[in-house]
Each structure stands twice: as structure tokens, then as C-alpha cells.
């Protein structure tokens, strides 16, 4: 049996579908009730309470571990999750980490994630690490303004990074959970090309078949919005990455293709599949 945490999100949902389609027994874990594919067991549980996961993990052989944003908070205790998994008989863990542990390793959340990676390596369980960069699905932040005003408002309009489609992350995760050859792998996951906010706006307009304007925010304007959604330190860190990506953050990784045998999906593909969110 495979346990998928974060099973109703933009990675966990397609991952759960892929695993179920492969014939695997799957337990989908999320904080709130949600529909899951036929044959999948759904359990409402909170990763902030590792003790409450014991009934979920009992009998599981593999675990996909995705920590929500609040669980990345400085001081949060993550090692207990892995200890609970090992004690429950889990043999393989696929951890959703972040490219930032390589490119910007000294931020508090990335220090915590690197420590979790190290704990997993030393746990005695089989492991794989997934380190995605920026997500194509972050464009959903613009959905309301595109629906209501046909405009994307974002900073650094001509600065881009190779955004990864969450569906590709899910497929890589499925391969790591199902195939022994990925044990011990650390995969950096990106899209096929660097794409700027202005170019993303053009892709959304093409998907919609309607004009969409781009309005460039100042760093200060963008920061004010981000600070309403996240701690100020993380907001500034995010702006640093968006405004001045390092060479490592601009690199198009071959790892999606190495695992899946095909090129990663482009942002335009993601936009076409999610166009209804912007109508």
C-alpha cells in the first residue's frame, strides 16, 4: 500500500490518480474530505500531528511526503514524521523537497528541508528526493484578475525561470514510488524553457483566445501583496528569486526526461489544461 500526503493538491491529486491507474493500493491523506478515484481509501489527517498518522501508515510500504507551507515554519518538527513511518514498517519514502536546498541553501525553510533530507537519508528506509523549482500553477494567483479585468499584474515582467508543471512532478513521484531504479535519486525538476511573466501572459491569452494585458508591479507593490499571504522574510526571499534568479535557478534540468523518457511539459500546455480557471 502507498500513502500519499497532500493528496488533494495540484501534485497529490494527479499522483493519486496515476498510482490507482497502475493498480497500486493507495491511501490518500489530506486535511479535508475530498473526492478520490474509485478504489482509493481517503483519510482525513493532519501532518502536524505525527501520532495521528499511525493508523494511516500501518501496513503501508511506501510514502509520498509533501509538507504544506505552514509545516515549513521554523521550529516545526518534521523528523517525527519519518520516525513514525519507519516504526510503522514503511520501506520507501519519496520526499517533495525544493530546488532551493541547492540554489539558496541558507534560508530558514531551506535549512529545515535540508535537515529533513539528511534525516531521511539516515533513516534506513529507501528514499528519493524531488527538488522542483517554480511551479507553473503559481499562475493561478492571477486567475481572478484575468477573469475580471483581463490583466496579469506581476513584478519583473521580463525575468523568467523554467517553471515546472505539477503534473510532471506527480509523474516523477509515481515512478519513484513504483520503480526500484530511482532509489537514492535526487531529482531537480524544471520545465523545458525559461519563461517570463510577460510570456506567461501571452500563453494565457492564447489559451483563452482573448487579449490579456500585462501590468508590471514594482517590487514594493508585489511585496505588499505577498506579505499578506506569507511571512515577510519568505516574501522578500521569493522576490529575490523572481527578480534575480541565479544561474542554477535558470538551468533547465534534464531530470524529468531522465525519469519519464520525454521532455517536460511547457507552460503553454499547463495553461491550455487549466484555461477554465481564467475564464
Image (cartoon, rainbow, N blue to C red):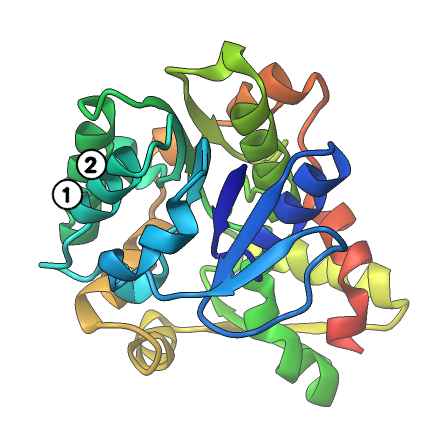
The extreme bottom residue here reads 148
Say above or below: 273 vs 18: below
Residue 72 falls in which quadrant of the image?
bottom left
Give residue 245's mark: none
Q: Position of residue 195 (x, y in %)?
A: 59, 45
* Depth check, front residue: 249 or 277: 277
Q: For mark 1, does the 10 Å Cα neighbourhood hold few (<14), some (14 to 19), or many (20 or more) residues?
A: some
Say above or below: 195 vs 45: above
Residue under pointer 1? 111
Give residue 114's mark: 2
Residue 256 in view, yes or no: yes
Q: For mark 2, does the 10 Å Cα neighbourhood hold few (<14), some (14 to 19), or many (20 or more) residues?
A: some
Q: Secondary structure at mark 2?
A: helix
Q: Between marks 2 and 1, how big is the CA–CA gap? A: 5 Å
Q: Secondary structure at mark 1?
A: helix
Horizontally, residue 114 falls left or right of residue 241, namely left
Question: Residue at position x 82%, y 73% from top?
Answer: 211
Question: Residue at position x 79%, y 66% from top?
Answer: 275
Say above or below: 77 vs 152: above
Horizontally, residue 114 falls left or right of residue 136, namely left
Q: Position of residue 181 (x, y in %)?
A: 52, 10
Amino acid at each position: 500500500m502507498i500513502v500519499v500526503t497532500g493528496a488533494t493538491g495540484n501534485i497529490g491529486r494527479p499522483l493519486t490518480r496515476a498510482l490507482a491507474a497502475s493498480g497500486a493500493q493507495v491511501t490518500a491523506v489530506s486535511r479535508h474530505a475530498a473526492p478520490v478515484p474509485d478504489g482509493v481509501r481517503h483519510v482525513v489527517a493532519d501532518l502536524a500531528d505525527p501520532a495521528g498518522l499511525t493508523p494511516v501508515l500501518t501496513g503501508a510500504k511506501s510514502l509520498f511526503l509533501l509538507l504544506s507551507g505552514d509545516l515549513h515554519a521554523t521550529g516545526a518538527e518534521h523528523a517525527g514524521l519519518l520516525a513514525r513511518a519507519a516504526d510503522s514498517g514503511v520501506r520507501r519514502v519519496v520526499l517533495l523537497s525544493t530546488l532551493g536546498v541547492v540554489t539558496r541553501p541558507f534560508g530558514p525553510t531551506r535549512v529545515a528541508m535540508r535537515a529533513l533530507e539528511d534525516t531521511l537519508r539516515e533513516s534506513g528506509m529507501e528514499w528519493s528526493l524531488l527538488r522542483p523549482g517554480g511551479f507553473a500553477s503559481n499562475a493561478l494567483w492571477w486567475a481572478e484578475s484575468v477573469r475580471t479585468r483581463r490583466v496579469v499584474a506581476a513584478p519583473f515582467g521580463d525575468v523568467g525561470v523554467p517553471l515546472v508543471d505539477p503534473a510532471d512532478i506527480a509523474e516523477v513521484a509515481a515512478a519513484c514510488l513504483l520503480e526500484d531504479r530511482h532509489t537514492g535519486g535526487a531529482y531537480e525538476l524544471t520545465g523545458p524553457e525559461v519563461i517570463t511573466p510577460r510570456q506567461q501572459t501571452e500563453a494565457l491569452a492564447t489559451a483563452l483566445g482573448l487579449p490579456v494585458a500585462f501590468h508590471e508591479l514594482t517590487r514594493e507593490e508585489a511585496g505588499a501583496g505577498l506579505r499578506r499571504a506569507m511571512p515577510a522574510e519568505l516574501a522578500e526571499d521569493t522576490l529575490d528569486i523572481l527578480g534575480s534568479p541565479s544561474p542554477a535557478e535558470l538551468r533547465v534540468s534534464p531530470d524529468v526526461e531522465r525519469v519519464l523518457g520525454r521532455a517536460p511539459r511547457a507552460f503553454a500546455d499547463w495553461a491550455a489544461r487549466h484555461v477554465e480557471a481564467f475564464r
